[in-house]
Image (cartoon, grey):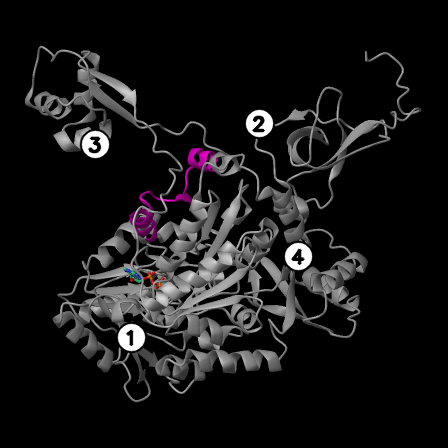
Amino acid sequence: MSSDSPNLDSLFPDAAGAVIADVLIPLALDIAYSYKVPPGLTVQPGDVVHVPLAARETIGVVWETRTGAAASNLKAVIAKADAPPLGSKLREFVDWVARYTLAPRGLVLRMTLRSPEIERNERIAMGVRLVGAPPARLTPARQRVLAILGDGLLRAKRDLCDEAGVSAAVIDGLIDEGTLLPEPMPQAPVAPVPDPDFTKTIFSEAQSKAVDELLTSLRQEQSSTTLLEGVTGSGKTEVYFEAVAETLRKGRQSLILMPEIALTGQFLDRFEKRFGVRPAEWHSGVSGRRREKIFSALASGEAKVIAGARSALFLPYADLGLIIVDEEHETAYKQEDGVHYHARDMAVVRGRLENAPVILASATPSIESRVNAKAGRYTHVKLPERHGGRAMPEIATIDLRADPPSKGRFLSPRLIGEIRETIARGEQTLLYLNRRGYAPLTLCRHCGHRFQCPNCTTWLVEHRFRRALMCHHCGHVERRPETCPSCSAEESLAACGPGVERLQEEVAEQFPEARALVLSSDMPGGIERLRREIEAVATGEFNIVIGTQLVAKGHHFPYLSLVGVVDADLGLTSGDPRAAERTFQMLGQVTGRAGRGHTAGRALLQSYDPDHPVIRALVSGDAERFYREETAQREAASMPPFGRLAALIISANERQPAESHARALARTAEPPPGVMVLGPAEAPIAVIRGRHRFRILVKTDRSVPIQTYLREWIARAPKPTGNIRVSIDIDPQSFY
Ligand code: ADP
Ligand code: ZN
């Protein structure tokens, strides 16, 4: 239509046969927008399309199509995008997650789409091959290169430099002379197909029974959830690999979710041993180009097994036949920003929608999963013993009241003695302390000044290695001064409490001959270095490993025979309703690193409160009793999973508007029977990143649909204005 013709469309709606597409846009929007589908274009639900939005163009996904009377001011779909469509089950999943978490559907949708910020110009590694006659001038360096390439094979330039001991210039020179031909190196295939029968594992009787039970639920060809509970070292991985093999034989896809996928080099090796190739990996460390390829290979069904972080749950699988959630109790599965979802719980949902069995594996399952198993909602498969006749580590306490470390030190004489003996036997010790840095608090001995974060109500943590004071909540960094900023006293600053770096100092003093290593996520060198270091620990290169929670997870260190928990009381004193459970799980995992090789393992827990039920449960090895008591307490208090929780965090740049909005919200809560609204109260960490925070906790009976209540409440409540934000967290896992 030319622009000067009169626009009569608004007088006459289009004929009733117009096709309208409701398109969900990956932004913080909950509703799908309607667009006309222009003649000549056919779209179906799930298609990714370009659409106009305000003054710009964006992509969205067709959620529904219908024919009807289109208002003539409806904008039109521009075109289909070059992207695999979203299947109906994945769309259903998006709707489900949004309904459950109360996140806008568009934000959930965004997690399923290919990230737009793909680095398209990533370097492709170049190789060279011998093609021409040797050059006139034949230096020794050139001779070495030619000797290596004599077999006519293609070699990566970088490897060739290393092997021949020459600089890249030597190779470039040979290319210029026409002796060598550059050629791009073939890319490793993103998703070679694993062979379910590459090797055959010989299982113990208990393991065979567990495998049979898993395969039985798999063969039922319907959704089911199984809790695979087996003590550390019992062979859970080997057992669930059989479920992966079975799924491969059916030609379907498996997803293995892992809490620390970036650090699981050992897992990938084991997978390769079992199946001949590595699985595809999905986590933040995978490059953009590779992510794009994996994304397509999953959508086409070509990729069969993926090992991924929680975000892998939202990928477009062509035919998902199995989901495994390894270390299902891990808190890393809860996403705390954007869409607040728990990947373990959403995995169960996705499994149900896809008709795919779900296996939750852990040595120390969450109370939630235990209760579900007890109630018969989940199948419970157990592996009560370590593989190969290995014993569980013997666990004992060191009562710090009776056997204290010397002043300013953190290792008790008894633990020091045990480490000495372990070194003498040529075995490894792991010292566990879940505190990064050197010291959690720095104060002036003269005036009492404490270093606090300017953006948060937290103490700054000293990192001596970086010569800095850092905030672990907002990332603020400042130099540690020489004099007190408050009273100018010199040499008056004292480090209070231990971090792993400080422990390393003490270890160096006590055991000057020992090779010690700190494993912590914030040491320079990133993930690659950590992977290498974990590998080195596994080959027995270090006598003493000092680590944060990162070392507790799933690693297999065959030389490790002693685990020393420096502060077993650390997690028990927090206000978190799951403090006991968390500590039990964490210490169960850490102590479970001991004695997985050929020597027996033992663990020593340093504590000022060795009679605490959690510590007693660890020492007695009576996990059943711990679960029974903890579950009973939860039930008595109607805490999850016997009741439901939601947290509302109201934040603002100033304290006053945050507080008054929180109060205004609470005034409109109108809780019906079975619902309790607690607060508002200032959050335990009152300020984070300069935002003042108030919390409201909603606690309901299990039978109350908490989302419906919250949705209705938020709809009638005053809307936040200015920079006030309200974030809702269903099933909160953190309480600060
Ligand atoms: P978990 O995951 O329960 O801690 P793993 O699956 O890591 O246990 O097994 C612990 C160790 O025992 C691993 O080195 C594993 O390869 C080995 N293992 C377990 N089961 C078998 C088996 N049936 N045959 C050979 N090795 C096994
Ligand atoms: Zn801060």
Q: Position of residue 446 (x, y in %)?
A: 38, 74
Residue 291 higher or lower than 474, as above or below: above
Local packing at callout 3 (Cα closer than 10 Å; few below 14, some 14-19, many 20+) is few
- Whether residue 275 appears in magenta in the rendering, the answer is yes
Instruction: Residue under label 4, please give it.
Output: 100
Q: Which residues are magenta?
A: 267-294
- Whether residue 199 appears in magenta in the rendering, the answer is no
State how far apart marks 4 and 2 are (Cα): 31 Å
Instruction: Report helix, strand or loop for mark 1.
Output: loop
Residue 46 higher or lower than 455, as above or below: above
Q: Residue drawn at (68%, 36%), measured in percent from left and top? A: 45
Instruction: Report helix, strand or loop for mark 2.
Output: loop
* 272 and 126: which is toward the camera: 272
Quarter occupied by the N terminus? top right
Instruction: Residue under label 2, please give it.
Output: 82
* 430 and 34: which is toward the camera: 34
Q: Nearer the viewer, mark 1 or mark 3?
A: 1
State how far apart marks 3 and 4 are (Cα): 51 Å
Residue 99 higher or lower than 366, as above or below: above
State how far apart marks 1 and 3 are (Cα): 44 Å
Q: Earlier in the sequence, mark 4 or mark 1?
A: 4
